[in-house]
Amino acid sequence: MISPKDPVPFSLANSGTYRTSGNFGPTQYSISATGNGPAVSHQVNGGEYSGSASCSETGAVSTTSDDKIIQASALDLDASSQGSIEALPVAGMQFTVSGTLTIDSPGNGKIDNSVVVGWSDGGVVSNQSFGPSTSGTVTFTLSKTLSPPAWFEVTFGVDAKCPPPLLDEGVDDGIGGSYDVTIALSQ
């Protein structure tokens, strides 16, 4: 797990075999996260920020004597990469936020991959969010010219979760996602 306070760029990768006590079979797992850009909120002059997160696990379930399925694994995999930036532009400054968000191989896991842009234009606060709802890539662009009092903030990230499921066919779970966000300022 990568903490938002870790220095950037960051990279985490881990994989192996897990076996808990009792009559559970072994579970193969892997988890990874990468990020490039601000990991904590601060003022910026723009730039490009990217990251990814993924997890997977495979294994066999175990059953009780009365053939009820019990939890296949004690693993609860969660990989995330995220960041947030903010700026206080001068009057008449334009900001553009663009990029891509991708979801790969949605299995039984869950993924949250989004970019949220909030801004104040003349004191009126607005926001817009972008994110894929299924597999594939979403391309987005948002441009605004702001009048004082003005600010804008961009929050982006991907969170991949592979929880231990209760499946009668065994554990076979994997999911991943990525973001690539460019923020440009002009006047």
Image: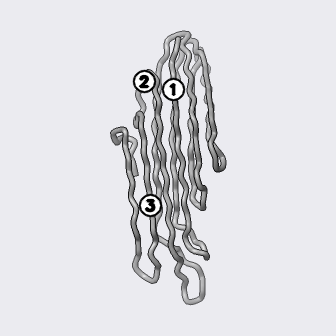
* Residue drawn at x 46%, y 83% as measured from the top left: 23
Residue at left offset 51%, top offset 18%:
185
**Position of residue 76 measured from the top left corner of the image (x, y, whole percent):** 47, 62
Which mark sits nearer the N-terminus, 2 or 1?
2
Q: Amino acid at mark 3?
A: Ser
Tell me, yes or no, whether the two marked residues, 2 and 1, touch with CB atoms within 8 Å.
Answer: yes
User: CA gap, disc 2 to disc 1?
Assistant: 9 Å
Residue 183: image tag: 1
**Disc 2 residue type?**
Val
The image position of residue 125, as x and y in percent, is 60, 24
Report whether 144 appears left or right of 53: right
| Amino acid type at mark 1 | Ile
The local secondary structure at tag 1 comes to strand
Image-based side of 4 in relation to 58, left or right:
left
Mark 3 and mark 1: Cα distance apart in space:
32 Å
Residue under numbered circle 2: 44
- Label whose residue precedes the other's in the sequence (3 or 1): 3
Q: Nearer the viewer, residue 75 or 186?
A: 186
Q: Residue at x 51, y 22 (%)?
A: 184
